[in-house]
Amino acid sequence: MDANGREVIFSPLRFRNLEVKNRIFRSSISGRFDNEDGSITQTRINWESKFAAGGVGAIISSYVPVMMEGRIIAGYGTVHRDAYIPLWQKLGEAVHAHGAKFIMQLSHSGRQLDLPGIHNKHRIARSATSTREPINGVPCQAMDKAEIAQVVKAFADGAWRAREAGLDGCELHSANGYLFTQFLSSGINDRTDEYGGSLQNRARFLLEVIDAIRHRVGRDFHLQVKLGGVDHNNVMPWDKVGNRIEDAVQIAKWCEAAGVDAIHVSSGSSFPHPLNPPGDFPLDVLSTTYDTMITSGDFGLRNYLMFRYKLLRPIFHWIWFRLKKGHPVEGISLEDARLIKQSVSIPVIVTGGFQHASVITDAIHSGACDGVSIARSLIANNDLVKIWEQGADQPERPCTYCNRCLVNAPKNPLGCYEVDRYDGDYDRMIQTIMSIYSTHADLKIPAEEGLLTR
Ligand SMILES: Cc1cc2nc3c(=O)[nH]c(=O)nc-3n(C[C@H](O)[C@H](O)[C@H](O)COP(=O)(O)O)c2cc1C
Ligand code: SF4
């Protein structure tokens, strides 16, 4: 081991049923690559493959709805039909060709939608609550027990399809404000039945899903849970306070007891949240992209006007940026991960701002986590792991945490929109972003050369 022990980053991480070649996971990054019906495309294969070619140990897929009603937006690949198993298999093979594992993120939006779309616009979103989502104002209706049972089954079926497709595991998207968070959060869940009230009751839905998955796929298939450390639930100053870290620790322990193989720590009761992804929030870009969301919820027009008119921007700026004070960007959830890791014996992965080999090395050696997941720094430099392997601590053109990738995502192709990283060359930036949008009649495994972007 060298002086600072950075070899740990490149050492395998062993889970109960899975070994990943290093400690770097590509965190989920959703974009609209896929077809309206939920079938995946060559563009998706190109997207996921370039991170695998760049050296990460595992890819955690973008948000994959287990049913059409659980989509955030049209154009996300789904896993709600057996007919899609061969397509996911192709994607898994493409990622495996680069020596990386592929973990599918099983998801349901509940009331947190971006663009409802034709498949779910005609029916009101189902949630743990009937209180509308506070940022965009998406209306919703609390699920009854029959509906809960239907969603539990959809998760189990999704996990089974992922296994049939030869994928390496599943992650339950139980963070960032989506359906699981809506059940778990003390600030959101206002039910009075056995799915609301005490923490145990609020965790019932998640634990039922874990149980149903274990019944459907057995104990041998890797299953991890992405969990908010602190959910905050504080974007709107009048919102009721959400779960604390003590709650997350308890939920993690229950997950472990229920047969989960790893915890992936995130934060926030919504996505985005001022602390997730951490960094800037470019309101000028939102003024050109948020128009797609004006009709998504009751507050869409109000928000759009705040982004569009410079005189109104300070209102939103205050709401959003007041919560960032005192929080680091790199390793923002590390201390939450440490507390969770101290309480469970399964591996813990943590997300949020990682870009320096030295920071990740320290995080692992200090016992805060076993590995990290990265989204934006890998969008900026797909081959970040290879850059670290060559000895650098950070890339020459690092991610600036500007969050332009994020606020473009509902409207525009996914990629790095920080034009300074392309020496101010706008055309080169767009060409780089569009490079994955090649189409083929059949799904193909792209060659490594020409795939990576920095
Ligand atoms: C454009 C974009 C899309 C994202 N989509 C998802 C998603 O589908 N599921 C998820 O759990 N997290 C999603 N995230 C959050 C990331 O996976 C990650 O946890 C977060 O950005 C913090 O990590 P980072 O600082 O390395 O970007 C997304 C982030 C970005 C920027
Ligand atoms: S747009 Fe590029 S630089 Fe900005 S946060 Fe996204 S990946 Fe990083």
Image: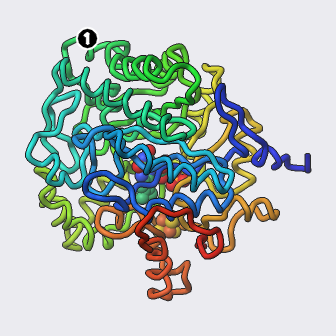
- Res 177 seen here: no
- In front of the other: 323 or 103: 103
- In front of the other: 362 or 240: 362
* Residue 286 x, y percent position in the rendering: 29, 67
- Disc 1 is placed on an element classified as loop
* Residue located farthest toward the left when viewing the structure as drawn: 122
Going by the image, does 416 lie left or right of 272?
Answer: right
Q: Residue 256: which quarter of the image?
A: top right
| Count of labels in the image | 1
- Res 451 seen here: yes
Q: Is residue 141 above or below residue 444?
A: above
Q: Amino acid at mark 1?
A: Glu
Residue found at x 32% / y 40%: 81
- In front of the other: 38 or 63: 38
- In front of the other: 34 or 419: 34
* Residue 311 x, y percent position in the rendering: 20, 72
Going by the image, does 108 lie left or right of 132?
Answer: right
Q: Is residue 392 above or below residue 229?
A: below
Location of mark 1 (residue):
194
Q: Is mark 1 within 8 Å of ligand 1?
A: no
* Residue 137 x, y percent position in the rendering: 16, 47
* Residue located farthest toward the right when viewing the structure as drawn: 2
* Residue 259 x, y percent position in the rendering: 53, 18
Q: Quadrant of the C terminus?
A: bottom right
Q: Residue 268: which quarter of the image?
A: top left
Going by the image, does 15 lie left or right of 68?
Answer: right
Going by the image, does 224 lie left or right of 3?
Answer: left
Residue found at x 30% / y 34%: 179
